Amino acid sequence: MGRFSSLFLVVVLVAACQTTAQPVSSPTPSPTPHTAVADAVLQSSDVSSGLSRCAGSGPLDIYINNLQPSSPALASRLTDEWQSLRTLGATSSAIALFTSDDSACTAELAAVSKAKSAAGLVVVFGDEGQADRAWQSGVLGFVPPAPGELPPGLNRGTATGLGFSAWTYDRAPVRLACWHKSVFVALVVLTNLDAAAFKTATAAVDARLN
C-alpha cells in the first residue's frame, strides 16, 4: 500500500519550495465562540453509507498514540507534524476516519488500496493569522501548490469553492481538500469515493467552521 502518487508529492514539494513569501497581515476578528473541533470535523452523516467510524477517531494526539503499536513509523511522522502545528499556534485538533475495511484505519492518509475511506482533520489556532500561516506551511505533509504551478487535478484558491486559502487534488481514486477558514485549518481526504461524496464532505465541514 503506497501513497497515491509519487509524482503528486514531488510536485507539491517543488511547489512549496517555489512559493514566495506572503505579506504578513494583522489577524482579523472572527465570531466567537468557535465550533469545537470534535463537532467541526467530519461526521458520520457527512460520508457515504457503508463506511464505519474508526476506533482511533478523536483528538489527534490520541489517534497517534493508537497508531503506535501497528504503525510506529507513521505515528512518529505524525507526531512531528502535530508538533509543528503546535509550534505555529495550534491549540486543539480532532481527526475522524470512516472506512469500508478496518485495515484502512491505520493506513497513511491518501494511501491507495481497495478500501473506501473518508478522513477529516480540523485544527484550531489562537488567531486567523496563525491558521493561515499553518495552512501555507502544510498540514500533515500536504503542502499547497504554488500559485501558477497547477498540474492536472490540482486547484488553488477560489476555484476550489472553499475560499482563497484553499487547495484541492481531485483525481480518482484520491480526492483531497485542505483549507483555512477563520481560526481553523481543515483537511479532508477521500479514497475510492466519487466526486459527489467529496463535495458533500467538504461542504459539510466548511459550513461548521466559524
Image (tube, rainbow, N blue to C red):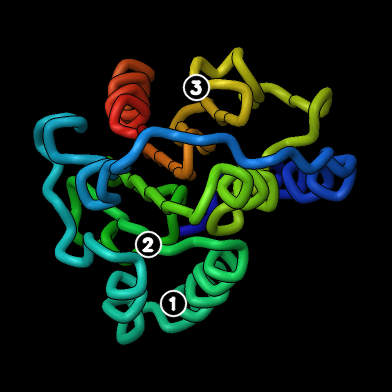
Q: Which mark is residue 162?
A: 3
Q: Do residues under tags 1 and 2 come within 8 Å of each other at their CB atoms? A: no
Disc ID at residue 92: 2
Q: Is label 1 or label 2 in front?
A: 2
Of the residues under marks 2 and 3, which one precedes in the sequence?
A: 2
Q: Where residue 33 sits in the image (x, y, percent)?
A: 29, 43
Residue at figure coordinates x 56%, y 47% from the top left: 131
The amino acid pointed to by label 3 is Leu
The reply to whether discs 2 and 3 touch (Cβ–Cβ < 8 Å) is no
Dot placed on the residue nearer the N-terminal end, 1 or 2: 1
The residue tagged 1 is: 75
Q: Quadrant of the C terminus?
A: top left
Residue mark closest to the camera, 3 vs 1:
3
Residue type marked 2: Ser
Badge 3 element: loop
Helix, strand, or loop for circle 1?
helix
**Quarter of the picture holding the N terminus:** bottom left
Q: Position of residue 116 (x, y in %)?
A: 27, 41
